[in-house]
Image: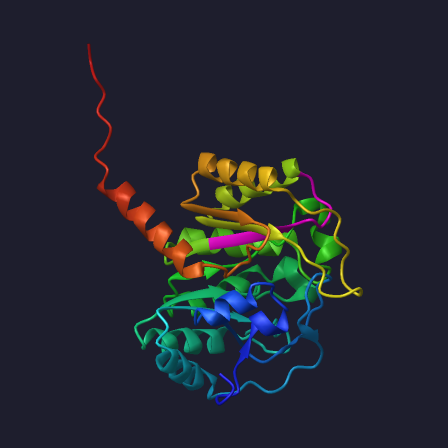
Amino acid sequence: MRERGLSTVCEEARCPNIGECFASGTATFMILGDRCTRRCHFCNVTSGRPRQVDPDEPQKLKDAVAALALKHVVLTSVDRDDLADKGAAHWAACVRAVKETGATVEILTPDFASPARQADDADAQRSRIDVVLAALPDVFNHNMETVARLYQAVRPQSSWTSTSAVLRYVAQSGHSAVKSGIMVGLGETNDEVKETMTTMRELGVHIATIGQYLRPSLKHWPVARYVDDEAYALFEAHGRSLGFTHTFAGPFVRSSYHAGEAHAHHMHSTEASRREPPSLRIIQ
């Protein structure tokens, strides 16, 4: 990665699982630079004026994935509100390049919307998403991040409506497994977590992740609570009752933690449901 000038969200976001994942040869590549045009109060990625997009990044990713012999690759990015297409074309090029290695590709995307005019940007947002979907990612992940009550305070330059629109549109397209996740410990209640999971499932999400928020620095959003194992078990049980193909909940769970495992579980569950014979009604 260093030889090719690539970035990982593992480092930029100071993920607590970095040692485990790097030791097992797993990383989440962060494309479109390492400077974000938005500032979320929980995130450690640097905000500021982004550098120019590297046109050679798709090839560099392809070379790195081939050299590391990765089987499941996760791509994410900073927000690029400075670009007319919010980076959609570059996203698609990166997905296509990595898929040429034979690896499955999971993407964790921004909302591809314009923060200043989200209300009238719906058509443009969908068009940008279509560009990315045309590259056929295996998993399309876009995080809810938190519950509705806290969303605007935690993510002031994004919106619950825009995030929901991404998930709904991707699910309706039928091109990819749809994934989303939230952090806990921001000030929400367990009931609000369950309500958010229900909303995610209604939007068409297949895979859900829930993990403990850890404050990157004293400048970031404070931790309101540390969620116990009993609550995570409750969330996983609720996920099963809602029909998620995979619900991954625990203190160190992050969006791309054990991503390959979650994708494999989803594929197995989906294939098993296709093989099940239709239920027969016994007439007495």
> Vertical placement of 204 versus 116: above or below?
above
Is residue 91 or residue 257 the one in the foreground? 257
Question: In this orientation, does residue 32 appear?
Answer: yes
Q: Tell me the quarter of the picture where residue 78 sits.
A: bottom right
Residue pushed farthest right?
Answer: 218
Location of residue 13 in the rendering, given as x and y in whole percent from the top left corner = 63, 69
Total tally of numbered discs in the picture = 0
Q: Is residue 69 left or right of residue 150?
A: left
Q: Nearer the viewer, residue 167 or 241?
A: 241
Measured from the top left, where is residue 34 in percent x and y?
61, 78
Which residue shows up at 50% across the image and 46% down it? 203
The magenta region covers 179-189
- Compared with 5, 253 (above or below) is above
Residue 85 % position (x, y): 54, 74
Give the residue at x 20% y 14%.
283
Q: In the rendered structure, does residue 156 fall within the stretch colored magenta?
A: no
Q: Is residue 188 magenta?
A: yes
Q: Residue at x 43, y 74 (%)?
A: 92
- The image shows residue 19, relative to residue 239, as above or below, that is below
Q: Is residue 27 visible?
A: no
Model colouring: rainbow
Residue displayed at 24% across by 37% down: 276
Residue 225 x, y percent position in the rendering: 73, 46
Q: Quadrant of the C terminus?
A: top left
